[in-house]
Amino acid sequence: MSAFRGILTGFGMAAIKDKEAKDNAKMEVVKAAGLDYHTNQLPAHKKAETNRAQAYSQLSSIFESEEAADYFDANGFITGDGKDVERITKMLEDKGIKPDAFKDYVPTENYGDRYKQRQTDFESRFDVVKKTFDMQGSGIGPSTVNGLLTKPEGDITTTEQVTTPAVEAQQIEGTPIMTSGTPERTEEVTTTLPRSTSDSPMSDFFISKIGSFNIGDESKIAAAASSYRGFDQGIQRDANNAVVGFSMDGNKNIEYNAFKAVMNQVSGKYEKDDKVSLSLAAEEANTVLYNQTQGTLESSIVTDYKAQELRDQDKKNKGLNTYTSSGFSKSFNSQFPSDQNKIDALKNHMDSLGTKSEAQYFARSFPVDVDFVDGTNVREFLLNITR
């Protein structure tokens, strides 16, 4: 063998060994990914899907309406975290389904459609691993999925017979002219209901069980609220030290208006002999406002949610009680992958809050450092649509 051929052979052997090393390294990565898939990702996915199915069935029973459960699933309230039923019933504890609210409800897609899409999205994340190892599915059988609400594809049509009564010919008064009569006519009329009502706001389906009360004059409301959230700093008093109102700048003023709105919503529980216990209403309003704002953001929408220290706030947000986070949570991103999906989910939540002040407070409480994929700041977007 010539020296030149020996060099070429050496290079060839080195290249082969290098490729083998890279292949082996790649296989080790795939093995690690496969191990993570089997020990972490797949069990978590199966558990979430089982939780979803259970929550869906339980909500169907609670509301005596599969369509109601489908509405919550379609709009992202069912996440599979095991707390869906508790969270939804807590949110609606003062509300009931309007009579016949879901009579004509037709979802844009059914539970099975959404389940299949989640399966596709989950499995696509492990395409490389799946090509190498035999993987299992979600663990939810087709009979379980088919047992949940399933609507036919396409628009829903109803056909009914409509009879138009006969009209007799009559003589026009003062003339010999006769009108032409028409015989009785029966025909079939088809009405089409588009598959679009899953996008409707929650207020279309639910109504307050307890109604709203005039819970008292401003001074009494302010006095009851003063024990919470630093509102005492905005209490206005007259020369006799009596409470006459409330005034603070920026976010605190909006927070106070939202607090009052929630007090009004829960006040029916504490009404007796035409009087409302404002202290009890204020106590519950404090909890409810937290749960629907900071609590929802922290548990269901973003990660590492925390109040921003005053020294860290930028100039335009000074003193506005702003918050930061690490971005949208994995579960929220998985449930609402596109910007439009996220916008729809956030709008739907704010629609469910009942008043503009509550929606504005939610928008102002959103982290300042989260953007959509297109670069739009989420908080600024929410502030714009709630103005």
Image: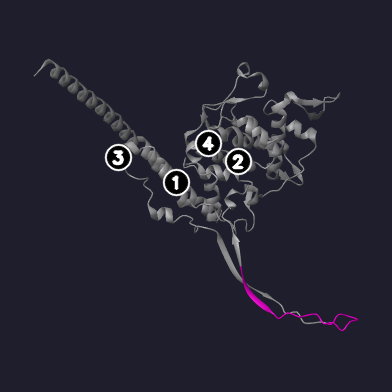
Extent of the magenta region: 171-189
Q: Which residue is mark 1?
A: 117
Tell me which amino acid carries mark 3. Answer: Lys
Residue mark closest to the camera, 4 vs 3 = 3
Q: Which residue is mark 3?
A: 131
Mark 3 / mark 1, whichever is N-terminal: 1
**Mark 3 to mark 1 CA distance (whole Å):** 20 Å
Main SS class of the magenta portion in the image:
loop
Task: Assign the C terminus to one quadrant of the image.
Answer: top right
Task: Assign the N terminus to one quadrant of the image.
Answer: top left
Residue 213, position as x, y percentages in the image: 75, 45
Tell me which amino acid carries mark 1. Answer: Gln
Mark 4 / mark 2, whichever is N-terminal: 4
Residues at discs 4 and 1 in contact (Cβ within 8 Å): no
Residues at discs 3 and 2 in contact (Cβ within 8 Å): no
**Mark 4 to mark 3 CA distance (whole Å):** 33 Å
Q: Which mark is residue 300?
A: 4
Q: Compared with residue 283, is residue 68 higher up or lower down, i.e. above or below?
A: below
Residue 263, position as x, y percentages in the image: 70, 38
Q: Is residue 180 magenta?
A: yes
Mark 4 / mark 1, whichever is N-terminal: 1
Element under label 2?
helix
Tell me which amino acid carries mark 4. Answer: Ser
Residue mark closest to the camera, 2 vs 1 = 1
Q: Which residue is mark 2?
A: 349
Whether residue 362 can be seen here: no
Element under label 4?
helix
Identity of the residue drawn at 67% across and 21% down: 316
The residue most toward the left is: 1
Residue 247, position as x, y percentages in the image: 77, 27
The residue most toward the right is: 174
